[in-house]
Each structure stands twice: as structure tokens, then as C-alpha cells.
Image (tube, coloured by chain):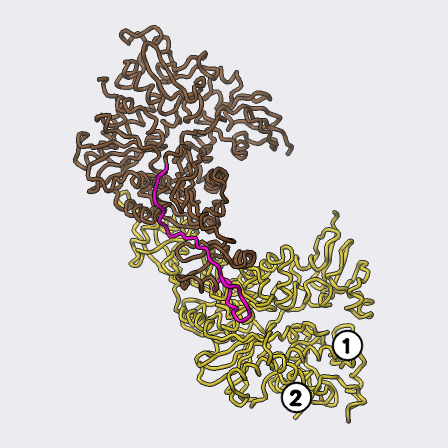
Chain colours: A brown, B yellow
Amino acid sequence: MGKTTLLVKPSNEKISVNKGSNLLDVLNQSNIYVEGACGGRGTCGKCKVKVLRGEVAPSESDLKKITKEEIELGYRLACRVEINDDLTIEVPGQAKEDSRKSDISSTVGLEAVTSFKKEYVELPQPVLKDQIGDFERIKRHVPEGENFTISLNALRKLPGVLRSSKFKITYTSYKNRIIDVEEGDTTGKLYGIAFDIGTTTIVGTLLDMVTGKALAVSSTGNPQRSYGADVISRITFSSEKDGLKILREKVLQGMNEICKELCKKAGISSQNIYHITTVGNTTMHHLFLGVDPTYLARSPYIPTFQEAQTLTAAEAGLEANPDACVYMVPNIAGYVGADTVGVVLDSHLEKSSQIKLAIDIGTNGEVLLGSKDKLLACSTAAGPAFEGAQIKYGMRAAEGAIERVKITTDCEIATIGNKPAVGICGSGLLDAVAQLVKAGIIDSRGRILPPDEIEGISPQLAARIIAGENGYDFILATEEESGINSPVVLTQKDVREVQLAKGAIYAGIKVMEKNLGITDDDLAEIILAGAFGSYIDKESAVTIGLIPAIDLEKIKSIGNAAGRGSQMALLSDTEKERANVISRQVEYIELSTNQDFQQEFMFAMNFPSPQ
Amino acid sequence: MGKTTLLVKPSNEKISVNKGSNLLDVLNQSNIYVEGACGGRGTCGKCKVKVLRGEVAPSESDLKKITKEEIELGYRLACRVEINDDLTIEVPGQAKEDSRKSDISSTVGLEAVTSFKKEYVELPQPVLKDQIGDFERIKRHVPEGENFTISLNALRKLPGVLRSSKFKITYTSYKNRIIDVEEGDTTGKLYGIAFDIGTTTIVGTLLDMVTGKALAVSSTGNPQRSYGADVISRITFSSEKDGLKILREKVLQGMNEICKELCKKAGISSQNIYHITTVGNTTMHHLFLGVDPTYLARSPYIPTFQEAQTLTAAEAGLEANPDACVYMVPNIAGYVGADTVGVVLDSHLEKSSQIKLAIDIGTNGEVLLGSKDKLLACSTAAGPAFEGAQIKYGMRAAEGAIERVKITTDCEIATIGNKPAVGICGSGLLDAVAQLVKAGIIDSRGRILPPDEIEGISPQLAARIIAGENGYDFILATEEESGINSPVVLTQKDVREVQLAKGAIYAGIKVMEKNLGITDDDLAEIILAGAFGSYIDKESAVTIGLIPAIDLEKIKSIGNAAGRGSQMALLSDTEKERANVISRQVEYIELSTNQDFQQEFMFAMNFPSPQ
């Protein structure tokens, strides 16, 4: 088996590979993230890379999933490429990760009240008349020491630390257990990381557990996403050989990258991270622990655990103090996870006297409805359309993504970073569809109309409507305007995907309203949680019927509420207890077998008539 | 760096080694135990091997530590041999390990009352109307389930086990934590191993934690012993590069061998071992945990921990159920360890209304004296003389070891297994010295007299007294009688070693008697613990002044009491609590700085005049 070289642009990484290796595998192993929704099956057409040098014949999947023009330009699906000779490729997605999620403003300001303690003690040095053991010396000196135990790691450090510091040390304890000992006074160095493990993006916030202040935020794409865009494809991949192991390693890799970056940003040692909390959907939590998620995807959709789990960083595989306590916020059900508990923690829905609706549109769409009297939750299989999966030019919110669309006599777009358009992200997609509905270019059934069916259409707009694979498509950015070698287009199929996604969410809301015996008029507030919720245009959301049409003033975007919930749990034992109560209090509604849901869904896929 | 081959006789093991390797290192790495008291420094002369094929020039250490005849026969110190070419050697010690310690009779019969539980449950299978999580399903079904937590390993097994068994499973819990789940009813499969980690020998007893019965006993030489015969040389080695790591790995290797053998003997799976207890001296306990023992060897002799430690088998590195609870019996002081606590557990000294003396002569000599009113303990630096270290022909109690000596008109010997004598073990050494003292061949100061100074000596005995390096030596087995190529001799230096050892123990007893204000007449009983204690001749022990001269009827050998203490702790929470109380109740007497001890020691080295 010979070796050959892969050169990756634009990062200029040179990778030595065994001949015969699969290109997507190599990129994954080298931590170069390439989009992938199907887990390497050649069916999603997302892992496109451009071959700059080297011969790679187009595969059958290429011919199906990539346009003829793209193939001529050298585009290939990475999952179908076998590397047999020196190869130079360009990875289009190798742009900057979504920096919007690293916004430090999305952190909580909470007083830290936890069971973690750091105490500085000056102990009398041992003499022949006082031969008590090192550990027992600490216990004797500490008022509450009677019941102390000590971790193996701390015990191993103890004799050296005591003697190099002349018996002046700081010990860290968690619930009567000493988990660290250090020379001198380090009582100020008590840190924790609150994680939000998203299907697509992992965010970590470093918190000072003495002051309660957030010190740094860092995020990265969930490295699992090369094995599937949504939880179902991840679950499917997990049952392949080593699949579960790989997915666990991948999420840990992402989390450990964040640990490292946070420590670097704040100038602290990872050994001083003593607490870690996680929120995430139930599948993410299963994969994080290496627990088989198979039965989540099969009726009756049973998770292996719902309750909060507690383990050490060493057990979890996280690179912090090995005895750091990892607390996983409890899950509500198989498809309503700890992230939803986090949203409730942050928004205090379970204490609200008014009826509120909260929607967290991430890769799934979890919906909460109710008040302190009764709080319902459901998961709408909205799918990751708003994150770009299944959308022809869909992409994450990265540089060059169309994020705003306005239809006047022509189509006006705004892109992230003001770069030439290379694709469209969730908020842009929502805008595009809403604006086209408003302009009468898309009808209420979701059909993109040909120019001759649209009354009074401008010639500029008419020119943008072109025949496509499944009816008509709409050009958002022409080849000249775009940063790729083709126009950026919204296809008829893309519109169908949006209809499915928004229909599922809206139908879920309707089923829950019916369960509570209320109507849209009873809603005191609609809360949009999640990064996507922060960036969408509320009017567009109402226009397409993603959410009930109530007064726009009553619609509130609260950003990454799940992540803040994770931070709250980190800083407070009381909030952890609240999380437990919430996870038991919230009533889960299973939609997959709900008759009402099927009916509502059919209606909800249509667009409301423009007002 | 080329390769070459080492062939080891009599086992005929073929080992491929890098040229330039050290022979002792290679043997250690290949788990071929060669005696070594100095940790490879070339000073103890114990790691003799015979070169059968290949050229190895004698080293300076060889010339000092091995006789000219032996060198001519091909004997070399393994620690000084660099392997540069194919080599065939014979390892003399590669005989059977001491099987006497595997005697199953030395086990306790105790009712098992612990916090471990195995419960068989038949759970209702999940349906869409009952979507509770797998773990929560167990909790719901179990009356005391409310407070259950579950280990990560058990959680990972759970979904598969539930479904393959149709939700009929057995869970194992320890103190409200589920640590295992298995298909079907396995409630009878609850096992534990009680270890006695001796400096020289490790013994493990497999116990049925349901019935309390001992199922099998297994022992092996402590693989650490190639790095030094006694605790001090081990501590010294532990401070060398990787020394601590190596010693920890070695003791684990021995313990895991025992685990494997016990499971094989009893026909059980190691996954059903849920509890492990250990006794051992304080140094062994430190090394078992990989905790630096350095400060035990330096004044003021401080252990890192004294109290009982609890950890999982996975943390400890033991090959049992990864969540098995490992409980280490508490230590009393730096040189009075958990093994001594084990002796008290077994002998109930701390509850005795009469004053008793207990001596555990292992590699160290720990002495206990007192009653329920006051119980003292000390460690006499007796050294491992009775285990063969520092004794020219000293060896462990293995085949061919002289175990009994009787002086009549000639010298009569008995060997283990009735094989030709290859050395002398502890009980034989004690007999030899006692008999020679009685016969007037050794005087009260410990000098082996030349024949012409001994009145009426037989010609046979006179012929056995020969000039040696430090005065006269005594031939126990002639070259013709022996199984080696030389006679087996008791040297003047050997007698000095016995004097030092027995003097230290006796002086320790005297100091403790003085502390309690008692004399030998107040002793209701003398208890000899440890394997050695079982095999020595009581009369010989009194003759040389190893123990006070009281009525032989009052002297009792109780065998491996420390090991039985470990078993008691395994089977009973009450005994664990007793161990904690004992470790705090026993008063430790430091002899190293005790004025009385120095004086008593000087007297005690002499032999009592023959009566």
C-alpha cells in the first residue's frame, strides 16, 4: 500500500495518505469539516469539493447530484473519491465557522452557589511525635473534614504538593470529596464550562465559579456532522461498525477543542476546570456518553436515560481536571432533550402565570406551550432545512451566505460579511420564501409560478424565474453576482422543504393549543430561542406561517437560551434542582401517532394568503 | 539495534530481545521472576542465573558476590549481564511457587451482609403510551428505586440487555447505584475477591457474596520482588525513573493473574466480581494505588493516607467488573499497615479481656500487644531474613528448601517436597540456628565455634564446620546431598542476620511490655500470624529468643490472619466498620527513635543460654 499526497486549499494543508483512501474519510480524520447529510452514502450531494490538480473521474453519484457545469469545473462528491495519486482540492466550506454563536453577550450573570469549594490551609509540618498521614492531616485541620474522602488523582498529587509548598496548600472539594490539591493559595482559580451540544454546532462558555462571570465563549461545528446532518442519520450511522465509537470520539474532539480554546482565551489551566455542564438533544446526550441511541429512532422511541447524569471528566473523556464533575442536564423525552430544559430554565416558563409559546428551531424544532399550570412540549420533525440541509444552495450562517432577501422590482440580497453570495442560510431562506409569497411569485400551495402566470411582474424578476428540475426555480444571485461558478438559486424543491419544516412546527403548535383548549389569541408571548431564532425576520416567520400571526411586539427572540440554561445549571445547585423538576413537570406530546397532527400538518403546509 | 534470542531453561521460553538489553530487565518484562533484593544494583547477589550457552564475561559484581567455583560453572548475576548475542540460561528459582499459601482452609466462614444487591426484575415492555426511559423504567419498578443512580458502564449495557432479554433482567446495585445489568436471572452470581498483598507473596480468595463461602484460593509471588526484597528497596526503586509506575504495574499484574486463575478455578466470569478488598502493609497499599511512598522511608515516616480508601476496579486497574468496588482496609501507621488491622480483625485482640501478644513475621515483623483496654502496635525492622534475603542460601518456601533441621550426632534435614536441598527457607533457618545453639556449636554471642572449641563434638559434625569468610560456616547439606553444584551452608554472616532479626522483634516486645507495665508472665497467649508463623517450630522460636519463653501450650499459630481479615471485610459492612475503629484505636509505637529499644536490642541479639 503506497503513500500519496493530498493538498487542501485554501488552508494549504498537506496530508500524506495511503493510496486507495476515501477522500471524505481522510478529510474527517484530518479534522477538515466537509458538509455531509447522508453519512457518506453519496445521496445528499453536500460534500462537494473542487479538484484543482489530479485526475478523478466523475462517479455515478456525481452525475446525479452535481450539475454538468460543476463537474466540468472539477467538482466531485468527496465521499465518492478514492485517492490513488497526488491530488489538490479546494474545500468550499472551509470558511470561518459561524462566529455569531460565540457572542459573549449570550451569557448569564448569576451568583455562583455550588457544592464546589477551594480552601487555602497552612498545616503544621509532621514530626516524629505527630506522624498522622498526609490526607488525615488535612482532615484534622478542617472543621468539616470528618467526612472527607479524596480522589485517587488528588491522593497521588498530595505528598509532593504538601512538601514542595511547605504544607501550605489549596484543596478543592466537591460534596465532601477532595478532588484536587495545589501548592499555595489558588482559591481564585475555580472554573467551569457550560456546553450546548448542538447537532450542528457546539458552544462552550467558560465561567468563573467564584464570581459567576463569563470569561470566554467558543464554538465549533459539531464534528459529527460529516456523518449526517440530523439526529436520524447520526443514529443510523451509530449502528454501523464502530459508528457509535466514532460519533462519541467526534463530539469529544469538538468539545475538547473548545476546552483548549477557552483556556487559551482566558489564560487559565484546564486543570482548574472542576465543573462541566451539558445541554443537548437526547440523541446528542446518548452519543456523548457512548450509549446506543438506536431505540430512539424506533417506535416507541425510548431513550436509555432521561434523568440528569453525573460523571467525572476522565470518565466522560473531557480534557479538564480528571475529577471535574460533569453534570448533564436531564432530558424530557426521546425527542425533547436537555436543550429544551435549558430553554425553560432560562425563560422561566414553568413559573409563568401567562400562557407562552416557545420555539427552539435548531436541527429539530422543539416547541413548548403553557404556563405554570400545565406546560407541554413536543418535537416537530422539522428537519434541518433551516440549517441548509436538503436545500440546494443551503449552507450554515458563514461568510457569503445570503441572510436577507427583499423583493422589490428586483431581488435584493444581503450576505454575511458582505461577500459575494455562495449560498443561502436559514434566515435568508425564510426571507426569500416569505418575500416571494408576498410578491405573488410563490402561490399559497407553494408553487413557484412561471412569469406568465404572475400579474404585473417586473422584467427583472421575470428574468430570475427559470425552468428547473421540478417546475420553476428562482435566481437569488446571478452567476455574475455570486462567488461561485453558478448562480445561487432557490428551487421548487427547496420551497417544498420549507413547507414541510414550517408545516410540522405550526401543526405541532396547533395540536398543543388544542390540548390546552386555547387559541392563538390566548398567547401572551411567542419566544424564539436558538441562534436561528435571533436572526430570522419575525414578519417573514409570520408571513409563511411558521408561527401564529400575533402582534409582532409580542414575539421575542432570546438567542441561545439552551446554552444559558447550561450556564445556570453550572453556577447553581438550585438551578440543577429546578432542571430536575422541569424535566419531570413538562408533559411530552408524541406527535408521530397523533391523528390531529396529521390533519393539521396537511393544512399547515400551505402558505397563508398575503394580507 | 539488532535482535538476538534468549532461551530460558527449564521453562524453554524463547525470547527475542534487542541487542544490548539487560538480562534482568528482559526476565522481568517476560514475567520470569528472578530473586532480587537490591533492585538491580549488583549488591545483593540474589539474581544468579546459570549461562548454559553463550559468552558472558564475569562482572566486577560477579567476582564479589559469587564464588569462584560458581563463576566457573557459568553462574552470573542477571542484573549485570548485557545480552549481545544468542544466550541460553537456566533460572534456578524457576521452581513452583509456594503452594502452601493457597490452602483453602485459611478462609473465614461468615454470613455475607453487605451493601451489594442483585435483583431480578420483569419489567413491562415500553409502548407509545409509556415512553419512560430504560433506566427510569427500572427505577419506577423498584420500591427503593427513587434514589438510584447508574454507572456509565451499566448505562451503556442497558438498552441492549433489556431488549435481548425481553425486559427480564438482573441488576446489581451497590449503595443505591446500579453497577451492572444482565439478561435473565443471575442473582446467584455475586462474587468478591479478598486480597492479601504481601511484600513477597500475593494471595487472593474468591468468595461467594451470597452464601459467604470461599470458592477458591490462589497465590503468586509478588512480581515487584525483582525490584527489591523488602519495602525499603521497593521505596528506593520507586523514586527512579518510571519506578513507581513499574511497581504499580507489577503488583497489578500479580493481582490480575490471581483474578484470572480464581475465575478459572471456580468457573465464573470476572464480570461477576463486584467487590474486592485488600490488606497489605502501608507501602504495598501506596504502590497499589501508584501513590509515592518516598516519605514513608524518610523521618518522620509519614504515609500519604491511613484511612480506608474506596475506588472502582477500573480506577484501580483490576480486571473485574469495571464498577466493582475496591475497598482497601485502613492502615495504622507508616509501618503498621492494613495487614496488621487484618490480624486484629481475625483475632479480635481489640476485644480481648486478657493481654495477648501477636506477631506477624512476614517481610517485616509487626507486633501487637495488649487487650481491649489498650492495644499497642510496632513494626520491628526485622528485615526479610526469614524469607531468605541476606541469607547466603536463603530462599522462599519452595521445593528443595530445607524446612527442618535436627542436630544429633550429625545434621539431619528435611526439605520441601523431599527434593535434594537447594537452599534454606525461614523455618529451616530458625531450626538450624536453634539446634546449633542447643548443641553448643553456636555460642550465646552468636559465634559459630571451631570444632576444637566444642567439647565432645562428633566427628560428623566437626567435619561440617569449615572456615568461611567471616569466621566459621556450617554445612547443612553436602555437595553430594544437595541439588546444586555446591553444599548448602549456614554462614557466620547468616547467623548474624538471624540475630539482628530476632533481636529487633524481641526488643520491640520488651519495649511494649514496658509501656503497658507488664512482664512475660502477664501474657495469656502468644499468637503467631502469617504463613511463616504456621511453619516454625515453637520450641526453636523460644530457644533462639525470638519470642518470650512462656508455656509452649500458650503459643498458637493462626496462619494467614491478615488474609482472613481481608475476607471478613469483604463479606461484612460491620467488619469494615470494625476495621476503621481498630485502625484508630491501636496505638502505634515508633521504635526508630526509642531509647529503650536501642538498649533492649543490644541485649536481645544474644541467644539465651541453653536450658
Q: Which mark is residue B487?
A: 1
What is the chain identity of the residue bearing mark 2? B
The residue stretch that appears in magenta: A107-136
Q: Compare residues B420 and B360 and report the one nearer the observer.
A: B360
Residue A292 lies left or right of residue A20; in this view the side is left
Q: Secondary structure at mark 2?
A: loop
Residue A397 point in image, percent of width and height: 41, 26
| Pointer 2 and pointer 1 on the same chain | yes
C-alpha separation, residue under disc 2 versus residue under disc 1: 29 Å
Residue B313 can be seen, yes or no:
yes
Q: At label 1, which amino acid type do we have?
A: Pro
Q: Residues within 10 Å of mark 2 (few under 14, many from 20)?
A: some
Marks 2/1 in contact by CB < 8 Å: the verdict is no
Quarter of the image containing the N terminus of chain A?
top right
Residue B116 lies left or right of residue A125; in this view the side is left
Q: Main secondary structure of the magenta part?
A: loop
Residue B436 point in image, percent of width and height: 71, 86
Q: At label 2, which amino acid type do we have?
A: Pro
Q: Dot 2 corresponds to which residue?
A: B608
Residue A5 lies left or right of residue B586; in this view the side is right
Lower position in the chain sequence, tag 2 or tag 1 = 1
Residue A243 can be seen, yes or no:
no
Q: Compare residues A215 and B403 and report the one nearer the observer.
A: A215
Residue B410 point in image, percent of width and height: 74, 87
Q: Is residue B506 above or below residue B274?
A: below
Q: Is residue A553 above or below residue A127?
A: above
Q: Compare residues A482 and B463 and report the one nearer the observer.
A: A482
**Residue B15 magenta-drawn?**
no
**Residue A108 magenta-drawn?**
yes
What is the chain identity of the residue bearing mark 1? B
